[in-house]
Image (tube, coloured by chain):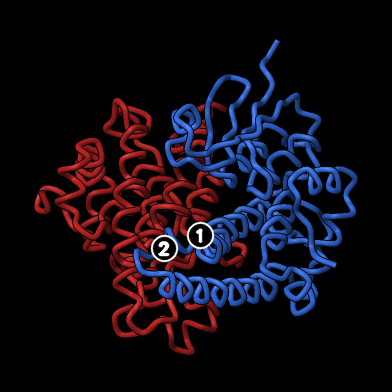
Amino acid sequence: MANPYRLYWTPTSGSFVVELMLREAGAPHETIQVEDRRAEDFLAVNPLGKVPVLELPDGTVMTESAAMVLQLFDAYPEADFTPQGAASWTKARRWLMFLTCELYTAYQQSYHSEHFTVGSRIAREEVKSAGRGRVRELWKIFEAQALDPGPFVLGERYSAVDAYAAMLASWDQSPEVLLTIRPRLGSLVQAVCDRPETAAVLEKYRLGFGA
Amino acid sequence: MYKLYWSKRTGAFAAETALELCGAAFEGVQVDHKAGAHREAAYLAINPAGQIPALALPDGQLITESAAMVLHLADAYPDSGYWPMDTAERAVAYRWLVFASAQLYETDLRYSYADRYTTAPDGAEGVRQAAHRHIDHLWSIVAEALTPGPFFFGEELTLLDPYVAMVAAWHYDLPRLCAAEPRVHALLDAVTAHPAVGPIWRRYELPMPALAA
């Protein structure tokens, strides 16, 4: 019998989308909460000290949440969350790469400014503030180009890219403001939240969208 | 036919390499990045974000992330032999492609365009220094995955290798990277010596590791 997937996670982290996919796919999995990302035994698993880490049934270890999404597309070609058809595949991957390369790092800059400058506390504030500006600008591009017409990135059909976008939106400093100024992103988030497995995973990860 | 909007030394290199290796019919449209042509109306009408590269697909769809272009071509040309078919190997390829684009590429941007990452007029130097420190740590992690090398999958070149080599060539001090990480140096040597990839590397005027070291 194959081993279960093994997902290393922490609250509020990018593991959210991976766990949601594993649950939606009905994939046998276990989750391991990482108490100390700087502990030696975890650094041996991922030298960057970051979650998520996913161990596949064959023992292959993966980092990078977007890479895990791609892998689960391959593993579950018939799942609801997997794009169908060449044009959808391409669009889904394009926006997944946009979200992970651009928005994910802009949120990192907003929350972990100490990694983005060697400067003082004031310098870190200036980095944070540039990061927040970048976040706003990137959501504007995403809404205009990826959610036209929406509600999902692939139009009427859900994919895990939508869950990825919703996860990033929940990281916003003020999600309720973000979803008001970006109403199509708001509809996407609502549609993701309406999926049966979402609420429990959001709660486990202590993620939400404000009032 | 594909249409690739490219400029020297940009991420278009990875896309052009993938098009070439997959045997896809394409036309290259050079956008003069140095002269600011990517900010002019003619180009913004094609790609409103003004980024290079941009790839127009035969069906008219436009893609802007270089890693997404690689993934698209890997999928569109499954018989090319330049992307693994085995599940475990695909997991490895996805992992390092995303690592290269979301971590390495993004960190290169932090020292190349440091002023964009701070609102302080004199903040760029601090951003640059943090990025230098971070990128060196990231490359030490990549080097571990390049065992035995020279490519990620041993002697077999995949679309991942030119992508990672390109990002390595953008390092703030390439001779230093080559000296510190011999496996990354070996990857650069193997990619630039590849008969199909080397000529594209030189046309994009990416630095040669042998000259750098």
Which picture quadrant has residue A172?
A: bottom right
Q: State the residue in front, A21 or A204.
A: A204
Place residue A196 in its image quadrant.
top right
Residue B84: in sight, yes or no? no
Q: Which chain is red?
A: B
Q: Give the spatial CA distance, label 2 vs label 1.
A: 7 Å
Amino acid beneath label 1: His
Q: Secondary structure at mark 1?
A: loop
Q: Relative to A7, is B203 on the left or the right?
A: left
The chain containing the residue under callout 2 comes to: A
Placement of B73 over or under B111, stated as above or below: above
Whether label 2 touches label 1, CB < 8 Å: yes
Which chain is the one coloured blue? A
- For this rendering, which residue is in front, B106 or B12? B106
- Mark 1 is surrounded, within 10 Å at the Cα level, by few (under 14), some (14 to 19) or many (20 or more) other residues, namely some
Tell me the chain of label 1. A
Residue B89: x %, y % from top left? 49, 29
Tell me, yes or no, if residue A76 can be seen here. yes
Image coordinates for residue A210, horizontal then vertical, percent: 80, 65
Q: Residue at x 79, y 77 (%)?
A: A180
* Crowd band around label 2 with a 10 angstrom C-alpha radius: few (<14), some (14–19), many (20+): many
Q: Is residue B205 shown above or below B119?
A: above
Residue where numbered disc 2 is placed: A116
**Residue bearing mark 1:** A112
Instruction: Describe residue B68's horizontal placement relative to residue A23 as left or right.
Output: left
Q: Which mark is residue B64?
A: none
Left/right of residue A166 with respect to residue A129 in the rendered view: right
Give the residue type at disc 2: Phe
Q: Secondary structure at mark 2?
A: loop
Residue positioned 79% across, 63% down in the render: A209
- The x and y percentages for residue B52 are 42, 70
